[in-house]
Image (spheres, rainbow, N blue to C red):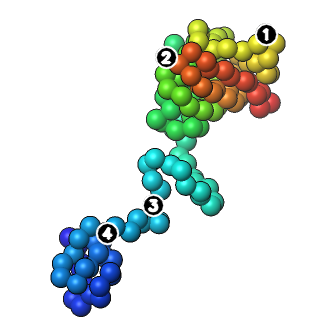
Amino acid sequence: MFVFPNSPAVNDIANGYTWDGEKWTMAAVPDATKLNVSGGQRTTGGFKTTVPDLGPVASPFTPNPYLGNYQIINNGGPLTINPPTDTCGIDLLIYNLPTAGAVTFGAGFYVGAGKTGDALTTTSGSMFVVSIRKFTPSLATYVIKALQ
């Protein structure tokens, strides 16, 4: 339920409406406290995020950017990671379970020979960050960072 002032002055804004002297109409003034969906704005400060822990994932696994830029998965067996379907950047934290299997990367990733970063082992308890970038429908890349 909206609450409007009893005696508004012309151009007062309340609940997204502007008083024109006779009636309340949709405010023509943008709300500077909100980000536009289309972007094109400068932000100051950062944003907190909740990182989804997806647990053991089925193979093949395709990261979903709509779950966030940071995601946690468990390696519980042989795992193939495919490129995301949308242009995005995602960092996966991979935690190796005692049953960890080899991790491979599916078709659609472009990485020069020897340019993938650290080795991704199957040692139980080991953790890795895999930074994935998808630039175009046919160009995705990744790099691995071992955390032990």
Q: Residue 27's mark? A: 4
Nearer the observer: mark 1 or 4; the answer is 4
Q: Identify the residue under disc 2.
A: 58
Which residue occupies the foreground of this view, 69 or 77? Answer: 69
Label 3 sits on a secondary structure element that is loop
Q: Earlier in the sequence, mark 3 or mark 4?
A: 4
Closer to us: 26 or 15: 26
Q: Earlier in the sequence, mark 2 or mark 1?
A: 2
- Marks 4, 2: nearer the viewer: 4
Q: Earlier in the sequence, mark 1 or mark 3?
A: 3
Residue 93 on image: x %, y %: 64, 31
Residue that appears at 28% across and 71% down: 17
Neighbour class for label 1 at 10 Å: few (<14), some, many (≥20)? few
Is 83 placed left or right of 146 in the picture? left
Q: Which of the two discs, 4 and 2, labels the residue nearer the N terminus?
A: 4
Query: In the rendering, at what x and y percent does residue 11 appear?
Result: 32, 81
CA–CA distance between discs 1 and 4? 57 Å
Q: Is 119 placed left or right of 37 in the picture?
A: right
The residue labelled by disc 3 is 34
* Gap in angstroms between the C-alphas marked 2 and 3: 38 Å
| Distance of label 3 from label 4 (alpha carbons) | 14 Å
- Residue pictured at 63% horizontal, 14% vertical: 109
Which residue bears the numbered disc 1? 113
The kind of residue on which mark 1 rests is Ala
